[in-house]
Amino acid sequence: MIEPITIAITSADRKLAYEFAQQQPTRERSQQVYRNTLAVLVTQRCLQMLGIDTDLAASHSWNPLEQQLENIADLYIPSLQGFVECRCLHRSDRKCYIPPEVWSERLGYVIIELDEPYQEAQVVGFVESVSVAELPRSYFQTLDVLLDCLTSSPQPQPMVQLSHWLKRTFEYDWRPPKQLRKMMKELEPQRSDVFIRQQVEQLYRRQSPRGIQIPHHLNPQEALVNLIQTTPDDEIRWQCAELLWELDPKHPACPVISAKDLGIYLLGQAIVLIVGILPKSDGRMLILLRLYPPEKQSHLPPGVKLKGLDEEGNLFFEVESRQQDAYIQFKFTGDRGDRFTVSVVLDDASFTDNFVI
């Protein structure tokens, strides 16, 4: 049986935790982030000793924005494409507090005793799942269970968290590639300022049979934002959002778009899957799925299928490429918490990934 492991906390650890804590808006949040950061660093060192690789940069707890919004202390495990939660308690505490926002989508929960002056900590236990805010010490399992869970037991299918993308937090294998904007623009005609103005005017005319004109005081970018926020037509909203994304991908009204090269899954065909998410004013989400051809090719191979299945496994769309298709796509609207699966099939090869909005 693996006994509780004592881990030294270095001055560099405390300095980093202090830097994160100083960025918080309140004293309570500052103290919370300080202890959470140390808990994550202690867990990382413990897992390294057990031969398990981790990735701090891919962890939500290492994202400054998420630190301010949520009480999280997660650590990404690349080999399992999932997160362990690192929760701390004082040596005198009889229970460990686990906030409700981390009760799901975790590989497990590592429990650390952490007391001032923060010179060392002790990894005292592990649990695979929680459903209560206060976990008694009697529920803690030994570190043998932690090792078994992260190295041998079957793991739940990982889900791509699209709502996290809105906070610019991406899964390890879904970080937006630097060349994404360039790749998408290469398949479009050269867009001059005059061309963009004409496109925006066409979108405004489609908004109403009477042909609403762009307000004279708005430039094309402002006009696109205005239409994104006011149109009842989701197709027009998407077209405006994509055009705005081409002009300024960091604009807050833009969709969040990322991509994955499927070459290793599809017999070497470097087809790219684009996924985008755009919030609506009613809280629902517009989702874009699009397949682009391999780099330096203008068309997809014929016969590529893009499929979507709902949470029950029912097919709710299927699109297949034809000769001369520059891309194929499907757009739909969903609610937060909706789950779906995307499959891309070419001959006998396929790629599948699971998403939750």
Image (tube, rainbow, N blue to C red):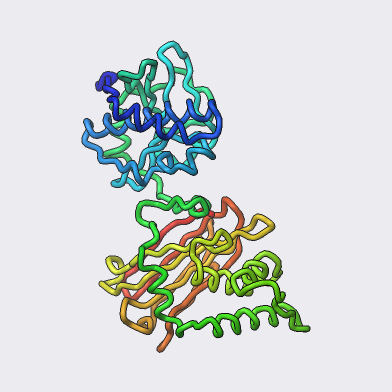
Task: Name the residue: 63% across, 67% down.
Answer: 225
Name the side, left or right, on which 8 lies relative to 26. left
Q: Nearer the viewer, residue 186 or 14?
A: 14
Task: Name the residue: 44% across, 11% down.
Answer: 92
Name the side, left or right, on which 42 lies relative to 30. left
Task: Name the residue: 36% across, 16% down.
Answer: 117
Percent of width and height locating residue 76: 35, 42
Task: Name the residue: 28% across, 25% down.
Answer: 10
Q: In the current view of this chain or complex, which residue is farthest to the right? A: 210
Q: Nearer the viewer, residue 88 or 156?
A: 88
Percent of width and height locating residue 31: 48, 25
Q: Looking at the figure, which quarter contains the N terminus? A: top left
The image quadrant of residue 353 is bottom left
Percent of width and height locating residue 220: 61, 74
Q: Nearer the viewer, residue 317 or 81?
A: 81
Q: Looking at the figure, which quarter contains the C terminus? A: bottom right
Relative to 30, is 192 above or below?
A: below
The image quadrant of residue 177 is bottom left
Q: In the current view of this chain or complex, which residue is farthest to the bottom? A: 323
